[in-house]
Amino acid sequence: MKRNTLMMTLAVVTGLLGTAASAGYRYTTEVVIDTANRHAKGSLADARASADNLQFIGCSTRTSSGGVYVSCSAQDANGVSVTCTSSNSSFVQVVAALASDSTLYMEWDSSGNCTSLTADNYSNNTPKQP
């Protein structure tokens, strides 16, 4: 009888462990700005969900008869903000790849021109919260 009870308990526990759900790895990236080295990084979703009401990061594009224009901006929890701009049409593809839970990495030169833009879209990015 004890053996049957032990086997039943073991079967139940094994069944519960086998169906236990686990979330995947998540990486939180609030906005970080390095003005000395002229780069910034942050997750659009994490900036939106941050405890402060200061953080933001993102880009916009504008097309006119003069061509395309990209503008990317970020502000960290301390209120430090940066903006870079570019008329380089290849940056439009990066901005188009941004989603509400993307991580954006941007670099700029001393004149405020964007020199590098990266949009990371990984499963470990935190999803956007309302």
Image (cartoon, rainbow, N blue to C red):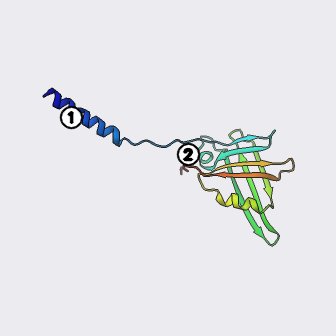
Could you tell me the amino acid type at mark 2?
A: Asn
- The tally of labels here is 2
Name the residue located 74 percent from the left edge and 59 percent from the top edge. 91
The secondary element bearing badge 1 is classed as: helix
From the viewer's perspective, is residue 90 above or below residue 125? below
Disc 2 and disc 1: Cα gap in Å?
38 Å
From the viewer's perspective, is residue 4 above or below residue 33? above
Checking the image for residue 72, the label placed there is none
Q: Nearer the viewer, mark 2 or mark 1?
A: 1
Q: Position of residue 77 (x, y in %)?
A: 68, 40
Could you tell me the amino acid type at mark 1?
A: Met
Residue placed under numbered mark 2 in the picture: 124
Q: Position of residue 51 (x, y in %)?
A: 59, 40
For disc 2, the neighbor class at 10 Å (few under 14, some 14 to 19, many from 20) is some
Q: Earlier in the sequence, mark 2 or mark 1?
A: 1
Q: Nearer the viewer, residue 82 or 52?
A: 82
Q: Nearer the viewer, residue 16 or 52?
A: 16
Quarter of the figure with residue 3: top left
Q: Position of residue 125 (x, y in %)?
A: 57, 47
Quadrant placement of the N terminus: top left
Residue placed under numbered mark 1 in the picture: 8
Q: Nearer the viewer, residue 82 or 20?
A: 20
